[in-house]
Amino acid sequence: MKKLDTNSNVYTIIYATIIVVIVAVLLAVVNQVLSERQEFNKKLDVQKQILTSLNIEYTAENAGDLYKQYVQEDSTDNGLPLFVATVDGAKKYVLRLRGRGLWGAIWGYIALNDDKNTIFGINFGHESETPGLGGDIVTAKFREQFKGKKIKNANNDVLSVAVLKTGTLAPNGQEQVDALAGATITSTGVNDMLLSSLIEYTEFLQEVDEATYEEAQVIKIIERENNETN
Amino acid sequence: MALSQKTKETLLGPLNTNNPIVVQVLGICSALAVTVQLKPALVMSISVTIIVALANVIVSLIRNTIPMRIRIIVQLVVVAALVTLVSEVLKAFAYDVAMQLSVYIGLIITNCILMGRLEAFAMTNKVWDSFLDGLGNGLGYSIILVVVAFVRELFGSGTLFGIRIIPESWYVANGGFYENCGLMVMPAMALILVACVIWFHRSINKESK
């Protein structure tokens, strides 16, 4: 048999075609087989993040069950994801945050009390912030600061919470937390992410149940009177 | 199993005298990117070792059929297919690690060690030798990655595999005297550490030059 000329044009083209088809089929099959598991992982990852934002401790095994137990509603508001959970009998709303850090994407979930104002808990994630510096946004120490802060002012405007260097004052009089030392750009990223993501939810956040709103006003008046008498 | 002199050379050479990173100076970029902590460095090492060994075997198997003009493209397709496989498997079975390594798994394709070994060895050698060569080079790469990651995680974060080694109470924040070395977590430090490894390696291997 004559030896095949592996350098002819026809052979090269046929060879390339066969290789590409084999690889394409192989990858398509693997993707099909594994996609269910990957989707499950992706969902579980989001569920874990939401649990963290709700201050619920979980292990790798019970995360899925805990999520089912606490989170009742998984809906969207104007195309934005919105989760409704009940923790210790109180209703919580969980909103998604998305932004940009120093090296790549940062994201998170923020849990609000049913006044749609007070932060109940928060969770951050990042793609490639510097470990030990910007990467510290995921630590409990940084996240704890947000608890109990208000994201709206008395006029029901969404102002978010400012992330600022210790000693600086928030420009619009909103509540603030301390930025991470040595991670200015990541901290600014978190600040911008909170503002831009919460602004997207403005309609949902401002639409407050009358009763809750009035109650808040009454509390505010009482507080003011107390301050004056002091 | 007794290894012949040549086999030994193929497998063990890349671990020391012909190390891909410190002697051939290939694959530096990923060595900088994934060595902040040990765990991703180890997963990266295992992934690269598996991929380079398998790619070597596959390319060696089809080496006589590959048209010379498109050989680089064929090698690239083989590597890309394997990398995609590894990435899919990691996403399915080790999601956390896959997220941590993010783009670097995909970037194994561009790791010079792979193309280097395929072009320099697998294209002209038998399957078994190519497998050993791939394995050896993968392991040679792994050694350096693990050494660099060990130093960087220990001094940069005070942990190893995420487990605390330097006690919390030593830190200045908790009234101690110790502070993590911030430079260790920066990519530049990986380069300096790799340079130190090269320095050390060359000074004990003088006669082989």
Image (cartoon, grey):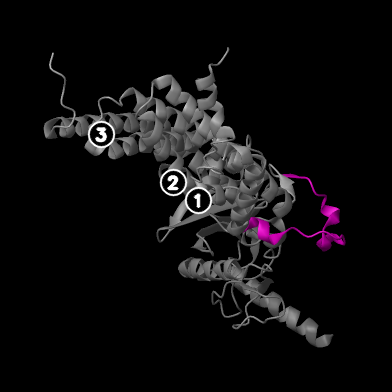
For badge 2, the amino acid type reads: Leu
Give residue B29's mark.
Answer: 1
Lower position in the chain sequence, tag 1 or tag 2 = 1
Tag nearer the camera, 1 or 2: 1
The one of B146 and A92 positioned closer to us in this rendering: B146
Left or right: B137 in relation to A133: left
Q: Are marks 1 and 2 in contact (CB under 8 Å)?
A: yes
For badge 1, the amino acid type reads: Cys
Q: CA distance from mark 1 to mark 2?
A: 10 Å
Element type at marker 2? helix
Q: Which residue is mark 3?
A: A20
Marks 1 and 3 share the same chain: no
Q: CA distance from mark 2 to mark 3?
A: 20 Å
Residue B194 drawn at (x, y percent) = 61, 49
Which quarter of the image is occupied by the N terminus of chain A? Answer: top left
The one of A11 and B4 positioned closer to us in this rendering: B4
Left or right: A218 in relation to A82: right
- Asked if residue A48 is among those painted magenta in the image, a careful observer would answer no
For badge 3, the amino acid type reads: Val
Q: Which residue is mark 2?
A: B107
Residue B70 drawn at (x, y percent) = 24, 38
Left or right: B142 in relation to B119: right
Residue B79 drawn at (x, y percent) = 38, 36
User: What's the residue at 33%, 35% (across, down)?
Assistant: B75
Tag nearer the camera, 1 or 3: 1
- Give the residues in magenta: B163-186
Which quarter of the image is occupied by the C terminus of chain A? Answer: bottom right
